[in-house]
Amino acid sequence: MVLMVSEEVREAVAAGRPVVALESTIIAHGLPRPRNLRVALELEAAVRQEGAVPATVAVLDGRPRVGLDKEQLERVANEEGIRKLGHRDLPLAVAGGASGATTVSGTALLASLAGVRVFATGGLGGVHREWTVTQDESADLGLLARTRITVVCAGVKSILDVPATLQRLETLGVAVAGYGTDRFPGFYLSDSGHPVDWRLDTPAQVADVMRAQDALGGPGSALIVAHPVPEDEQLDPEVHARVLDEALRACETEGVTGQAVTPFLLDHLVRRTDGASLAANLAAVRGNVRLAARVAAAWAAGE
């Protein structure tokens, strides 16, 4: 089999112990060096502190890997030419012997194939603004509609069309629940301004939903656990609104389109908030990782 699962992850999955998948794009493309490697190691350590096994996912030399050692993490963090791989890119990367960091869709697919049920990330991709003109929608949504995995995230990136993304998730049959909240979080913000229909308040409740998914035997879709960044660590909502409006106008003025839009907007937010947006992003990821480990433990324990 082409999938390479580390011995630690393989043994944990086989024994029914808690495992948490982690994506690698935040390491290769989301943070500056050398901070990216420090954060990668910190997130893995946080999973272990909660009693679970971390399974960072990436593709190295054409081999998809679930569970990286320190040397492999260093490659993802420091090697030039590391590509960004969604699930559609995986066959091309494997056949071409390429190395790349996996996005939400790439990570979710490989983790699921390795038998890992819980995945922690920052924010999902979704429906882009001006969708009626561009038809631009993240591949994350379609992949999650057909992959049985639980994703702990801080909602979808606030640069996107949040209500359209929620509607699209409903259409695709992807379950969404707020964790400790009746509001859908907005990545950098605790509240995107939109409600969620369901609320879960404990890891055990999340695990119960996961078991109900299996018992019902319906379509193999994901469960989105929308976990807000703490209010005292969120980006100031007024600053967020002002800078995002600036970024969107700059994007239009400079003619940025397609895959270049998201990195352009995120970079603008980091620069124009003096790094406050990045701090909020990391606060959200840290919280999501710890919650995901607790969910994985509840799932493994049958609580």
Image: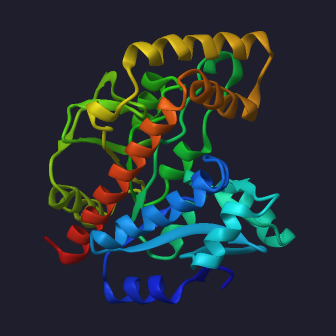
Q: Quadrant of the C terminus?
A: bottom left
- Residue drawn at 63 percent across, 67 percent down: 58
Q: For residue 66, what is the image quadrant?
A: bottom right
| x 49%, y 42%: residue | 124
Q: Residue furthest right?
A: 96
Q: Position of residue 289 (x, y in %)?
A: 37, 57
Q: Residue at x 66, y 55 (%)?
A: 28
Left or right: where does residue 292 sit relative to residue 205?
A: right
Depth order, front residue of 80/109:
80
Number of numbered discs overlaid on the protein picture? 0
Give the answer, above or below, for where 260 lies relative to 13: above
Instruction: Provide residue 302's location: percent of width, then percent of height.
Output: 17, 74
What's the coloring here?
A: rainbow
Q: Position of residue 93 (x, y in %)?
A: 78, 65
Residue 291 visible to an observer of this rendering? yes
Res. 174 visible in picture: no
The N terminus sits in image quarter: bottom right
Q: Residue at x 46, y 19 (%)?
A: 240
